[in-house]
Image (cartoon, rainbow, N blue to C red):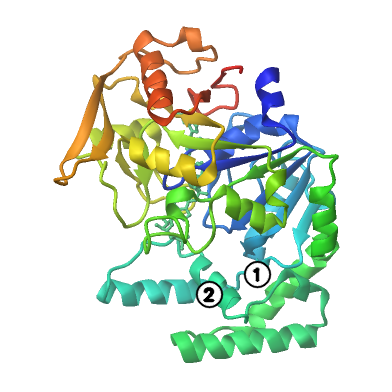
Amino acid sequence: MNEFIASLGQICAVIGAQWGDEGKGKAVDALTEHFDVIARASGGANAGHTIIFDGKKRVFHLLPSGSFHAGKKIILGAGMVIHLPTLLKEIAELGQSGVEILPRLTISSAAHIVLDCYKDIDAALEERRAETAGKIGTTKRGIGPAYMFKAMRAGIRMESLTRSAAELRREIATIADMARSLFGVSADADGELELLRQAADSLRGCIAGADEIAEFLNSKKSRILIEGAQATLLDLDHGTYPYVTSSATTAAGAIHGLGMAPRRLSSCIGVAKAYCTRVGEGEFITEAAEPAAGRLRERGGEYGATTGRPRRCGWLSIPNLRRSATINGFDCWNITKLDVLDAESEIPVFMETGGSGALSWKKLPGWQASTVGATDFGELPERAQDFIAFIEQETQIPVRLIGTGQRRGEMIVRNV
Ligand code: GDP
Ligand code: IMO
Ligand code: MG
């Protein structure tokens, strides 16, 4: 592990290479002990990052997944959109497990606040789309509306929590007016104000300005681990538009969302499942038919960590991996959930779309033996090793981490 950790350098980003839920949370949880700071940079509570801690399943929506590690500084960057009751709940739940968050939490004053009425707007827009262009299948967490208000320069930012109740009331009234006139949604302004005031009481001391955060992030002292949210193919600019989220989900987006100088990123780990899933609508050319899809879903526990929706399941796509690797500049892969393929007799991998539109596949032989809990590459069945070597060869990027189970230790680390 040590050589691998050293190879990551001072600032490392962990970025999803597919359509989300690749297992970023587990990777971050496993790596956090080697860093001083853990940070989320973009997105909001549409993220659901699962870890197993003390034998129990925990899902993070806003805090980084390494938050169980005591003493690590936590940053929520300017690119995030934060639903405050969800954040307070997450902090309280960790508190019940004896994990203190507030003294080590810093939230950018420029991060936007997700009001409850944004969720109603999200749902209303989805309803309208269903009748016209077709719905996106959002998480209904108000993410699109939050970034819409941000881009309209009408959003409420974390800095507002340090202002007077009268000012906050005025800001909310403006939003409520827009919600009604633009989207036909009526907001409960008093209720929203009350939620913000409660949050202000707890979080005021955590809010820091851009200068303070920039100085901290750009000082040469701390090792920083950035946890990507969503994933490259869900990126607003580079993903499968319009079936994407509303934020920048790439490594560049993470750097921008934190306010960090781009050249300071020392490494980027691409996280990809050994197969592929997608929640919500949109293209998925490697989507599997039954019964294979059902096998992957049940073995992989492929149900949304945020919404509980069954995930669409399918096979690995080499062109998608290459595209994500190019956009993000991955130094290495973390291939997760190898164990989910243990029972497959044959593993289809999508190679390319030919000139005539024909899809070209490779069928790799399955290993049909357990890889669960393997921690050493040499322990893997030969065909599983070949599968990993195939990904390396086709993407020209080394696979350094391999997931073999849900728990933190169920991972192979291949040293440089
Ligand atoms: P994230 O959003 O990228 O953090 O991923 P999610 O937490 O939404 O979904 C990943 C799911 O796969 C979670 O239930 C994890 O506990 C689980 N998981 C992660 N890595 C592995 C692995 O290597 N093997 C198995 N079987 N499960 C894994
Ligand atoms: P993590 O961080 C998987 C998907 C939604 C929908 C689209 C837009 O856990 O990998 P949104 O609510 O963001 O407007 O929905 O994006 N989506 C995710 N899918 N994992 C996620 O996060 C996702 N965050 C958003 O399903 O298709
Ligand atoms: Mg997830």
Looking at the picture, tell me which residue is in the foreground, 9 or 410. Answer: 9
Residue bearing mark 2: 148
Up the image or down, 299 lies above or below 371; here it is below
Q: Position of residue 266 (x, y in %)?
A: 68, 37
| Figure quadrant of the C terminus | top right
Q: Secondary structure at mark 1?
A: strand
Q: Is mark 2 within 8 Å of ligand 2?
A: no
Looking at the picture, tell me which residue is in the foreground, 71 or 39. Answer: 39
Looking at the picture, tell me which residue is in the foreground, 151 or 117. Answer: 151
| Figure quadrant of the N terminus | top right
The extreme front residue here reads 355
**Residue visible at 68% across and 18% down?**
3
The quadrant holding residue 413 is top right
Could you tell me the amino acid type at mark 1? Answer: Ile
Could you tell me the amino acid type at mark 2? Answer: Met
The quadrant holding residue 132 is bottom left
Which labelled disc corresponds to residue 214?
A: none
Up the image or down, 137 lies above or below 313; here it is below
Up the image or down, 293 lies above or below 41; here it is above
Left or right of residue 85, residue 348 in this image = left
Residue 290 showing in the rendered view: no
Residue bearing mark 1: 113
Mark 2 Cα-neighbour bin, 10 Å: few <14, some 14–19, many ≥20 = some
- Which numbered disc, 1 or 2, marks the residue closer to the eye? 2
Residue 400 showing in the rendered view: yes
Q: Secondary structure at mark 2?
A: helix
